[in-house]
Image (cartoon, helix red, strand yellow):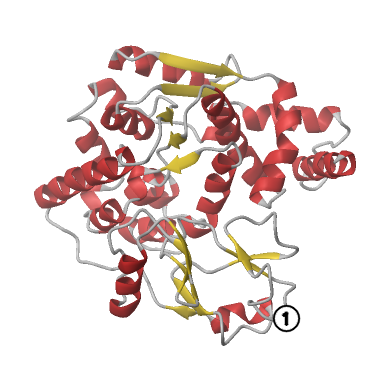
Amino acid sequence: MTDLCGGDPRLVRRAIERDEALPGTAGFAGEVDGRLVRDVLGRVPLFLEGDADRPTDAPAWSFEPTPLADPVLVPAGGVLDLESGPSAAADLESAVDHRWTLPDPEPDDEGVALERLDGAIRTGADAARAVEGDVAVAFSGGVDSALVAELLDVPLFVVGFPDSHDVEAARTAAAAMGRDLTVVELEPADLERAVPRVARAIGRTNAMDVQIALPLFLVGERVAAEGYEALAVGQGADELFGGYEKVVRLDHRVDAETTRAAVREQIRSLPDQLPRDVLAIEATGLEPVAPFLHDAVVDAALGLPDELLADEEIRKRGLRRVASRYLPAEVAARDKKAVQYGSLVARELDRLARQAGYKRRMDDHVSRYVASLLENADGID
């Protein structure tokens, strides 16, 4: 049986046979020849039924958590034989054949690295353009989404509260690029309505994950209502190219002792983050499209030398240098805020939680508020 999402079964079979971690896809997961597979970065979510005595008990697995009583995320880079186990979800880690791990190449020379990265990003964009149906881009005005928007040449949508950083940044960036922009302005009622749907879709109620997923869901709702079939995003750029302050500071938030190693550490965090983003977008009926997460881009990013990653002055230096070939200089140089802060979703969700009686003195008060909204919605359903 073959039930595969995101890749040609022949390509996946070859990847299994040859232990190819980056065989040329934008991610894959599903069942191939009686085996569950999930790519090395976990770009396609895959869940196993934790309550089943054996994974062959229906429903054994799913691409989303909602159909399962006790969904357990299948490890990225894993191959699981459905005939031989595990007997319980607790045994999953030992039962999975961790077939694929990220390559660890020597860094390229600066000039070679830039040309490889440029070509790889264009490869990722070409793959994104091959998606069936009309595509729009979630646009924050930062270099990541701006480069995606420019290479795909698709309509721009930004989401946020009226006085948010992202709405203003998107307006000025779109103007610099000579592009039209659709602004999805939020109000608190949008969050109250969307929180239960988002929490249910992503299978998480912790404040941070819900705050990140909400803007993706809310912009996706509008994009879908406008008749588009897919949403392009800049996901992965911060992890791949050194977009976080902590990879420069090398503080308690990372274990690595060099910037390049810290960036690699962030790349390894993607399998936990990406299911949240993918599921939030898919909950609106759209297909997620992430050009930076194509195997070609990941491979090129792994070869970037320190000088093209980040330092105290500039983060994502290599990406910005490539982007400057396509974007106005002021857009290619732009920093951005994390979406939950740039859109003011985190601020407003915190305010709603406090209005509902979940004060900041309580442990994890926003998560408690999210759980209460979900419980109330489930009671109504």
Q: Position of residue 113 (x, y in %)?
A: 16, 51
Q: Position of residue 132 (x, y in %)?
A: 38, 39
Question: Which residue is pictured at 42% across the width and 15% down the height?
Answer: 181
Q: Quadrant of residue 277?
A: top right
Is 65 on the left-hand or right-hand side of 101? right
Q: Is residue 192 above or below residue 86?
A: above
Nearest the viewer among 321 and 146 is: 146
Is 145 on the left-hand or right-hand side of 1? left
Question: Which residue is pictured at 30% across the width and 56% down the height?
Answer: 295
Nearest the viewer among 294 and 343 is: 294
**Residue 121 shows in this picture:** yes
Q: Amino acid at mark 1?
A: Asp
Question: Which residue is pictured at 71% across the width and 39% down the height?
Answer: 197
Q: Considering the image in quadrants, where does the C terminus appear? A: top right
Disc 1 crowd, CA 10 A, few/some/many (<14, 14-19, 20+): some
Residue underneath mark 1: 53
Nearest the viewer among 28 and 270 is: 28
Q: Position of residue 328 (x, y in %)?
A: 24, 21
Q: Position of residue 29 (x, y in %)?
A: 47, 62
